[in-house]
């Protein structure tokens, strides 16, 4: 990693050049909601002026640039009675600007799940390798809980990361490509006072969190609480709409579908991002559903997010961005569900007879 | 500087990107293609029962055929272009490097289409995937194989293995239960196996018909016929979920250690590679951690059986 | 066409309209990019929007519209006798559709309002499945041509015909739309069957549920959401009743 300090105006010149020459996406305001708050999404940008640098959070994450909602996996071309299978893993280079530390953490988690297992995904890798990521730090929103998940700072997974230190950006450069580009612009090595300003900025960010989720021993609590009534309670609220998984930066579960094209001359195998909250996620041939109840499915998503699966060494994959919580129409959010789960167990402390160490 | 360009060059992915984790089945001369199947010709189709057919497949490309090796208990994804792919456990001997046999029940959309195929048609396979039965670990012991219905199909591969390495095992008993006599699979093979290899088959049907002379009842009724020494026995169980519960708890009571009982689970899989999460049981994947689990692991998995 | 050893036959198809606007049938002639391929799948036996020929030897009958006259019942029963596969085609056929609005008023009043001074024979609207057996449904007002194509390909190739079981939200989120509820509107997306690619909400119009309920909808939670956001329950009721597609789901639950 190389650190440089760059005037914000100079940084804009840098991004202008980059966004002009490459297919680029950054945060843009798309709507104002009924309470007057701006709604943002990652959309195409062609100059620095298009980018809403002061944005709060995008409604949907940047996941779909790497895992499209619908993606062609392979194609079968028929001729006479024979067929050929065709696969391409090509991706065109893109620039993603304005990602938050939690968003970049999410990419690192996806790397872990999709590239480090037994069967690394070439589809994902092609896109990941061809994406130039520019991260920006930000002051947490009231409901961000990434600090609890330890994803409020980031040290890898990006090309450039900018910390806002007043008139300047403190720039972490994590790729030779980015370094070579930046050579063409005015930067300087950080001085003592720059480093102080960075430390101060980080402290302000760290002290600004209003939401906290206690995740101590959460995987084990989830295992113990498998049959907790909490799941039914929150499951009864769930609309089974899958919104949480769609906006989530790390939910990667999917469905594979194959169909003939209308001309019957070829067939395509598609992958479609799916959600474990959708009613037929665990349905098998013949119609048996292994998770027939709302609560079962909701629980499953929390298990995946907060307990982790064997494939990624049982690591939690939630980064604490709370996009799911904001998007959920039924008001289901990780903070309340997890606290509820903890409370449920703690409430019994007063009811049981004396246990060792508590007389 | 304004005329200077900042175009990010395209980077292709290459073999080196995967050197740390190239899966066995993709050891190919060309490029790593996780979703690319081996093209096979269906050389033979035998109707076994009303609902089941045995498909004999041969990988067309010599190089690919020499790469494809599997262990008893593993499965593959069988692709019928245009219709999709389904996980099917391999029912043939893993020492047969020329052909692969798959016992398929007409159950869903892909298998229905497969049943319309004629010999000579081309399909594709991906794999092999998943865990296998620990044949070496089981060596030197009595083996008890218990199958219910189509659960016999995944047990055929370990049975072949046992038959080919018969001297390594003590007593081998197969308990096999079906609903009706017409549903019995592969029983013809036992004539030879019983005579030459002393692999003893015990069958039972739930609903007997007029011609049925054998046992009549539930699979657990067969336990009366055999003596099980829990100290020296390995058990392999495969069948519908309800059977796992009954049989495994029976064997557990007999005193067979949980890590000497093996089950093969079934879930709907979409990728076979531990990515899509459709076949999750608790926190493990049926496709990469399974389908073969020891009973201790299954006991620990919520929603498993 | 031959495929892996077996041949696909063209689908002998006919399309009929009952009480409707014929908009769904018109969709069949839409989507020019694949229109010739699509027509190549079909052997059209009777379909007045696409062909002047009329034959009665069809296997598949697409039924558009709902039933609101006695003579329609007889005509439909005759079609049922001929068709091997009868498809409820479009929202009116599947649920009754907009025509069902009639049930909110006394029949006489409706006739006097719409056809003043004219003798009109009409009855309360029936959906197709209330009159004859329906083999499967393709909902939508109008139907989504892409989905119709997919289903016709399934029929031609002997694949299972399926509809998505999940709600529109999944498709709406994939379009990166802002949730209509966030914009202060009642949207039936969370309880409506997907498959339309969220075309209405992408155009910033709330979903009115033309594709009917998705599977296992949570109506109490949906009503609670409308209340919690202090939106009008009357408006909710009106939207849910619009296509008559949520018959049997009580939106007054608390």
Image: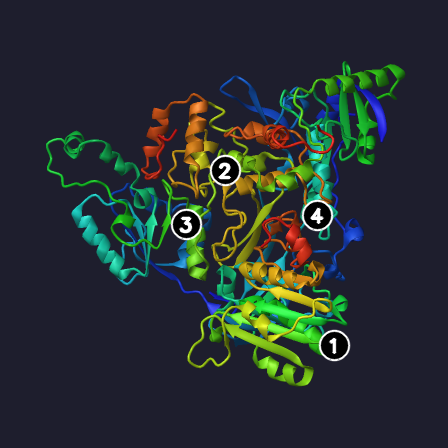
Q: Can you say which quadrant of the picture contains the C terminus of chain C? A: top left
Reading the image, the residue beneath label 2 is: A241
Q: In which quarter of the image is residue A253?
A: top right
- Comparing marks 1 and 4, which lies closer to the viewer? 1
- SS for callout 1: loop
Quadrant in the picture for residue B146: bottom right
Residue C148 disc label: 3
What crowding class fits label 3: few (fewer than 14 Cα within 10 Å), some (14-19), or many (20 or more)? some
* Location of residue C12 with respect to C171 vertically, above or below: below
Find numbered disc 4 in the image and state the secondary structure of the residue it sits on. helix
Q: Circle 1: is it few (<14), some (14-19), or many (20+) Cα within 10 Å?
A: few
How crowded pointer 4 is (Cα within 10 Å; few <14, some 14-19, many 20+) is rated as many
Q: Are labels 1 and 2 assigned to the same chain? A: no
Mark in front: 2 vs 3: 2
Measured in 3D between alpha carbons, the distance from the residue under mark 2 to the one under mark 3, in whole angstroms, is: 24 Å
Q: Name the residue under label 1.
A: B165
Q: Mark 4 lies on which chain?
A: A
Q: Are marks 1 and 2 in contact (CB under 8 Å)?
A: no
Mark 2 chain: A
Residue B278, label in figure: none
Q: Judge left or right: residue A32 versus residue B13.
A: left
Q: SS for tag 2?
A: loop
Residue at 43 percent across and 32 percent down: it is: C222
Q: Mark 1 lies on which chain?
A: B
Q: Which of A182 and B250 is in front in this view?
A: B250
Q: Does label 1 lie on the same chain as label 3? A: no
Nearer-N-terminus badge (4/2): 2
Same chain for the residues under marks 4 and 3 in the image: no
Q: Which numbered circle lies on residue A311?
A: 4
């Amino acid at each position: 990693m190389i650190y440089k300090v760059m005037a914000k105006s100079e940084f804009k010149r840098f991004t202008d050049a980059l966004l002009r020459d490459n297919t680029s996406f950054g945060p843009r305001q798309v709507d104002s909601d009924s309470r007057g708050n701006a709604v943002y999404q990652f959309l195409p940008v062609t100059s620095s002026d298009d980018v809403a640098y002061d944005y709060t959070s995008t409604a949907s994450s940047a996941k779909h640039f790497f895992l499209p909602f619908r993606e062609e996996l392979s194609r079968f071309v028929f001729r006479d009675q024979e067929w050929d299978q065709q696969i391409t893993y090509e991706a065109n280079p893109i620039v993603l600007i304005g990602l938050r530390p939690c968003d970049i953490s999410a990419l690192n988690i996806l790397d872990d799940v999709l590239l480090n297992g037994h069967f690394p995904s070439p589809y994902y890798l092609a896109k990941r390798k061809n994406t130039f990521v520019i991260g920006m730090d930000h002051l947490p929103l009231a409901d961000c809980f990434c600090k609890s998940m330890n994803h409020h700072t980031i040290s890898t997974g990006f090309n450039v990361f900018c910390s806002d230190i007043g008139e300047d950006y403190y720039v972490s450069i994590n790729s030779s490509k980015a370094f070579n580009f930046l050579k063409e612009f005015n930067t300087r090595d950080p001085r003592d006072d720059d480093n102080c300003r960075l430390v101060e900025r980080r402290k302000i960010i760290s002290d600004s969190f209003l939401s906290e989720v206690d995740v101590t021993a959460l995987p084990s609590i989830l295992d113990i609480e498998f049959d907790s009534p909490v799941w039914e309670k929150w499951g009864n609220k769930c609309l089974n709409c899958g919104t949480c998984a769609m906006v989530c930066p790390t939910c990667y579960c999917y469905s594979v579908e194959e169909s003939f094209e209308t001309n019957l001359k070829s067939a395509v195998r598609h992958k479609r991002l799916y959600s474990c909250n959708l009613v037929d996620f665990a349905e098998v041939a013949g119609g048996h559903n292994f998770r027939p109840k709302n609560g079962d499915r909701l629980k499953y998503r929390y298990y995946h997010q907060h307990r982790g699966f064997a494939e990624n060494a049982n690591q939690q994959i939630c980064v604490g961005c709370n996009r799911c919580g904001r998007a959920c129409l039924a008001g289901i959010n990780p903070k309340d569900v997890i606290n509820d789960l903890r409370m449920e167990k703690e409430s019994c402390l007063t009811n049981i007879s004396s246990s060792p160490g508590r007389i | 500087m304004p005329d200077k360009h900042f175009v990010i060059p395209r980077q292709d992915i290459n073999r080196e990107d995967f050197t740390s984790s190239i899966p066995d089945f993709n050891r190919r001369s060309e490029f790593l293609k996780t979703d690319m199947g081996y093209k096979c010709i269906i050389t033979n189709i035998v109707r076994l029962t009303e609902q089941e057919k045995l498909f004999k497949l041969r990988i067309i490309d010599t190089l690919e055929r020499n790469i494809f090796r599997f262990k008893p208990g593993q499965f593959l994804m069988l692709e019928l272009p245009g219709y999709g792919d389904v996980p099917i456990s391999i029912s043939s001997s893993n020492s047969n490097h020329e052909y692969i046999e798959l016992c398929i029940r007409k159950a869903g959309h892909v298998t229905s289409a497969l049943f319309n195929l004629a010999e000579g048609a081309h399909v594709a396979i991906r794999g092999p995937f998943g865990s296998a039965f620990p044949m070496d670990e089981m060596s030197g012991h009595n083996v008890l194989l218990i199958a219910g219905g189509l659960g016999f199909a995944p047990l055929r591969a370990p049975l072949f293995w046992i038959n080919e390495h018969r001297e390594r095992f003590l007593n081998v008993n197969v308990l096999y239960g079906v609903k009706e006599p017409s549903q019995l699979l592969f029983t013809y093979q036992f004539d030879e196996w019983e005579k030459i290899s002393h692999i003893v088959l015990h069958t039972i049907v739930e609903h007997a018909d007029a011609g049925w002379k054998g046992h009549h009842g539930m699979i657990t009724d067969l336990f009366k016929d055999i003596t099980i020494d829990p100290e020296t026995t390995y058990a392999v169980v495969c069948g519908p979920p309800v059977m796992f519960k009954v049989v495994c708890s029976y064997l557990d009571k007999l005193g067979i250690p949980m890590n000497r009982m093996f089950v093969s689970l079934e879930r709907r899989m979409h990728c076979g590679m531990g990515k899509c999460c459709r076949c999750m049981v608790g926190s493990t994947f049926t496709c990469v951690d399974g389908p073969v689990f020891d009973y201790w692991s299954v006991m620990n998995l919520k929603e498993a059986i | 066409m031959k495929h892996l050893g077996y041949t696909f036959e063209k689908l002998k198809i006919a399309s009929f309209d009952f009480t409707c606007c014929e908009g769904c049938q018109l969709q069949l002639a839409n989507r020019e990019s694949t229109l010739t391929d699509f027509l190549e799948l079909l052997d059209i036996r009777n379909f007045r929007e696409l062909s002047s020929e009329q034959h009665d030897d069809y296997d598949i009958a697409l039924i558009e519209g709902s039933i609101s006259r006695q003579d329609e019942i007889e005509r439909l029963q005759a079609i049922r006798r001929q068709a091997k596969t009868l498809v409820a085609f479009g929202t009116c056929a599947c649920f009754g559709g907009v025509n069902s609005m009639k049930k909110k008023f006394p029949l006489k009043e409706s006739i006097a309002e719409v056809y003043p001074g004219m003798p009109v024979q009409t009855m309360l609207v029936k959906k197709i499945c209330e009159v004859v057996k329906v083999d499967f449904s393709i909902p939508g007002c109008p139907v989504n041509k892409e989905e119709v194509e997919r289903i016709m390909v399934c029929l031609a190739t002997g694949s299972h015909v399926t509809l998505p079981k999940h709600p529109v939200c999944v498709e709406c989120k994939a379009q990166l739309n802002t949730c209509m509820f966030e914009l202060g509107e009642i949207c039936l997306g969370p309880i409506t069957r997907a498959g339309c690619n969220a075309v209405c909400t992408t155009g910033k119009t709330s979903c009115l549920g033309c594709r009917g309920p998705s599977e296992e909808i949570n109506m109490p939670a949906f009503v609670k959401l409308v209340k919690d956001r202090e939106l009008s329950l009357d408006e909710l009721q009106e939207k849910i009743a619009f296509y008559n597609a949520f018959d049997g789901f009580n939106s007054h639950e608390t």
